[in-house]
Amino acid sequence: MNLLVVFLGGGLGACARYVLQGTVYRWTGVSFPYGTLVVNILGSLIIGILMTSFEDRFLISPTMRLFLTVGILGGFTTFSSFSYETVALFLEGSIAAALANAGLSLILCLSATWLGTLLGRLL
């Protein structure tokens, strides 16, 4: 049952990532991985809110928690894509862009998770 829950959530999360990344890239172009950056920041914010809320306020079933966090958010966030795109930027000789992507992803995603934790405590 748990595998089915993760499978279904992961599919939904991957579809949401595909739509959001595509939208961001249509707005910004593809010279910098803004789509992946936006997805990772948003996913980090949401997991901070959800996990804090689940631990502090809302009792949900382990199955629903698995569906939302491992399934949906696991399918939504894209650190494997982040890693590949950063290495590709390095290999293309775009050292500054690669470092900016790595630095922004680390700082902004950790900050978003921290903010989500704070927001989760307020809900």
Image: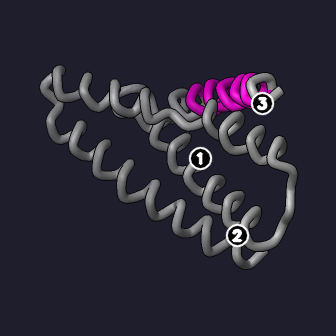
Q: 10 Å neighbourhood of mark 3: few (<14), some, or many (≥20)?
A: few
Residue situated in front as seen by the camera: 15 or 28: 15
How many numbered circles are shown? Answer: 3
Tag 3 secondary structure: helix
First in sequence: mark 3 vs mark 1? 3
The residue sitting at 74% across, 24% down in the picture is: 3
Residue under label 1? 43
Q: Residue 101 carries which label?
A: none
Tag 2 secondary structure: helix
* Quadrant into which the N terminus falls: top right
Q: Main secondary structure of the magenta part?
A: helix
The residue sitting at 56% across, 30% down in the picture is: 21
Residue under label 3? 2
Mark 1 residue type: Gly
Tag 1 secondary structure: helix
Mark 3 residue type: Asn
Residue 38, horizontal then vertical, whole percent: 52, 44
Residue 88, horizontal then vertical, whole percent: 26, 22
* Quadrant into which the C terminus falls: bottom right
Residue situated in front as seen by the camera: 44 or 59: 59
What's the image's color scheme? one colour
The residue sitting at 61% across, 65% down in the picture is: 116
The magenta stretch is: 5-22
Residues tagged 2 and 1 counted as in contact (Cβ below 8 A): no
Whether the magenta-drawn stretch holds residue 98 is answered as: no
- 2 vs 82, left or right, is right
Residue under label 2? 120
Reply above or below: 49 against 94: below
